[in-house]
Image (tube, rainbow, N blue to C red):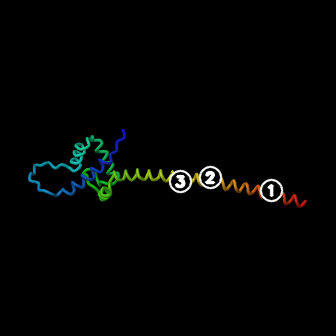
């Protein structure tokens, strides 16, 4: 089971932003209304939209807290880093950038292998030519000194 929760994490950040935008809108007419916490509202939305279990939601909240994108879990409050991170694309964009970087690195490695093979062949040719010229001059030197005798 290899499930990717990036969309759900971005959804939580988005819902936190929506909740904070609407927190003071409207008037409470009934004092008997039970206040529902932000984490409970978002948990219910996650269950309805993605069909997540309670333990998965708790893991997602903990992940956001560890990544410092929420200040606290109860009450669930978004941090400035979370707001900036979400506006820069969030977890989905981060995952796409990782994949693009991996592809780019793989292409660079292939290019480097190609160039290193060419450099190795060039070095072998230069070494072979140097060896031939060394033998040639060694033979010429020997001929010169034998001719003096």
Residue shown at the point (27%, 55%) measured from the top left: 78
State the residue in front, 66 or 109. 109
Q: Position of residue 148 (x, y in %)?
A: 89, 61
In which quarter of the view is residue 80 placed?
Answer: bottom left
Q: Secondary structure at mark 3?
A: helix
Q: Work out how far the residue at label 1 is from the one at label 3, CA to CA, in angstroms.
A: 40 Å
Residue occupied by mark 2: 121
Residue pictured at 44% horizontal, 51% vertical: 103
Q: CA distance from mark 3 to mark 2?
A: 14 Å
Give the vertical position of 109 relative to 48 (above or below). Answer: below
Q: CA distance from mark 1 to mark 2?
A: 27 Å
Quadrant hosting residue 88: bottom left
Q: Nearer the viewer, residue 95 or 23?
A: 95
- 52 in relation to 131, above or below: above
Q: Nearer the viewer, residue 71 or 24?
A: 24
Callouts 3 and 2 close, C-beta under 8 Å = no
Q: Nearer the viewer, mark 1 or mark 3?
A: 1
Residue sticking out furthest to the left: 29
Which secondary structure, mark 2?
A: helix
Residue 20 image offset from top left, x and y in percent = 22, 56
Q: Which residue is mark 3?
A: 112
Give the crowd class for mark 2: few <14, some 14-19, many >=20 residues within 10 Å. Answer: few
Query: Which structural element holds mark 1?
Result: helix
Relative side of 95 to 108, left or right: left
Looking at the picture, does residue 42 appear above or below residue 148? above
Which residue has dot 1 on it?
A: 139
Question: What residue occupies the far top of the structure in this picture?
Answer: 1
Q: Residue at x 16, y 58 (%)?
A: 24
Q: Position of residue 34 (x, y in %)?
A: 14, 48
């Amino acid at each position: 089971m290899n499930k990717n929760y990036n969309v759900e994490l971005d959804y939580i950040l988005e819902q936190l932003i929506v909740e904070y935008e609407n927190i003071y809108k409207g008037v409470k007419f009934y004092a008997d209304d039970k206040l529902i916490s932000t984490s409970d509202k978002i948990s219910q939305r996650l269950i309805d939209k993605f069909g997540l279990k309670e333990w998965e939601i708790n893991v997602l909240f903990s992940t956001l807290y560890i990544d410092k994108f929420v200040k606290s879990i109860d009450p669930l409050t978004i941090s400035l880093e979370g707001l900036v991170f979400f506006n820069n694309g969030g977890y989905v964009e981060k995952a796409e950038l990782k994949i693009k970087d991996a592809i780019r690195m793989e292409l660079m490695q292939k290019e480097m292998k190609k160039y290193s093979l060419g450099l190795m062949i060039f070095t072998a040719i230069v070494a072979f030519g140097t060896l031939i010229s060394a033998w040639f001059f060694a033979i010429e030197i020997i001929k010169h000194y034998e001719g003096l005798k």
